[in-house]
Image (cartoon, rainbow, N blue to C red):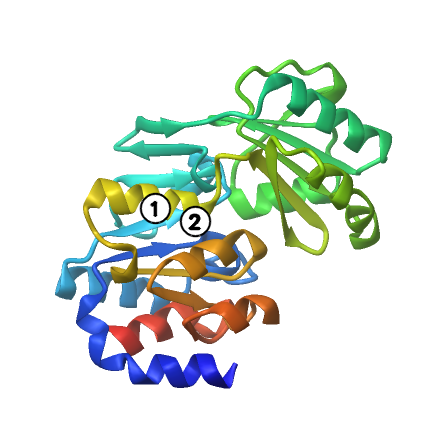
Amino acid sequence: MAVVLIFAKMRTGLKHAIRAIFFDIDGTLITNQKVISKNVISEIHRVRDAYNIPMFYISARMPKAINTVALNLNLNETIIAYTGALILNNNTIIRKSFIAEAISSKIVQEAINANIEYIGVYSFDNWYVNSDNYFTQREINATKVLPEYVAIENVTVENVQKIMLRDAPEKISAIVDKLRSHPEVNVFKTQANALEIFDNSCSKAVSVKYMSNQLNIPLESMMAIGDSEGDKEMIQTVGYGIAMGNADDSIKKIAFDVTSSNDEDGVANALKKYFP
């Protein structure tokens, strides 16, 4: 940690070199109470207006759930949903990918066999869940989106972009290695009780590389702020990868810098430091 922070201080003179910013949402932009603080909103608007820097949401959420956050902010029209399995510019699809139907069906069946409490299947702005349980209600509260309740084993979705599993940490730990044995998918343990699964062509690191090419901005001139395993490669990939104070130590160790937690205006504090 000390090495990372010292290195960050050595480069504070290069603040002007940051030409694009990517914000994770859950655990980063929003607090544990599922709101964006006034300080974070104010700092984002200040930096946007003063520095004219493009800013992007990059999230495992579906577009509709990203838009519930976007009501409070006025960022770029491009949103990166499902870690990049769906990228939209002004509601026009510019990139999409899907988990193959055979493998998505297999993963759902493995989750059913493991008696996983919450099984969610996502495609574009469609959200299918197996039951109305504690985890479903948590997702509704966080995203302000309502799912469709189905017998998940009977769902046939050709264009699956994310599968999410939630249960007690010990049950998630028991199934994660089996799911990661499928080379067709990327499996991220975004919380102790949550797994998010995408096509293996999708990750936030891949997405920022794609945006680097689209924007003609080098990766070393990009900032990305995040907190979870799904953000780790992205934080390593850009020049200014910032870990939230609430991130795991493994993420803080590889970050360019570490800010305060999502409940302590971590995003606002990072912006104040690099865009004074």
The reply, left or right, for residue 39 in relation to residue 204 is left
Residue 141 x/y as whole percent:
58, 46
Q: Position of residue 157 (x, y in %)?
A: 59, 16
User: Can you say whether 177 is above or below 247 in the image?
Assistant: above
Q: Residue at x 78, y 32 (%)?
A: 111
Q: Are marks 1 and 2 in contact (CB under 8 Å)?
A: yes
> Would you say residue 70 is visible in this rendering?
no
Image-based side of 59 in relation to 11, left or right: right
SS of the residue under disc 1: helix
x and y percent of residue 164 in the render? 64, 38
Which residue appears at 21% of the width and 81% of the height? 13
Mark 2 residue type: Ala
Tag of residue 130: none
Pick the front one: 154 or 114: 114
- Residue drawn at 41 percent across, 65 percent down: 37
Residue at image position (36%, 75%) is 269
Mark drawn on residue 205: 2
Q: Is residue 225 left or right of residue 2?
A: left
- Specify whether residue 220 is in view: yes
| For residue 219, above or below residue 260 | above
Instruction: Report the Cα–Cα distance between label 1 and label 2.
Output: 6 Å
Q: Amino acid at mark 1?
A: Lys
183 or 100, nearer to the observer = 183
Quarter holding the C terminus is bottom left
Q: Is residue 212 above or below residue 158?
A: below
Name the residue carrying label 1.
209
Q: Is residue 158 above or below residue 79?
A: above
Between 189 and 81, the one lying in front of the other is 189
Q: Are there few (<14), some (14-19), or many (20+) residues within 10 Å of tag 1? A: some
- Helix or strand or loop: what does disc 2 sit on? helix
Q: In which quadrant of the rendered view does residue 20 lie? A: bottom left
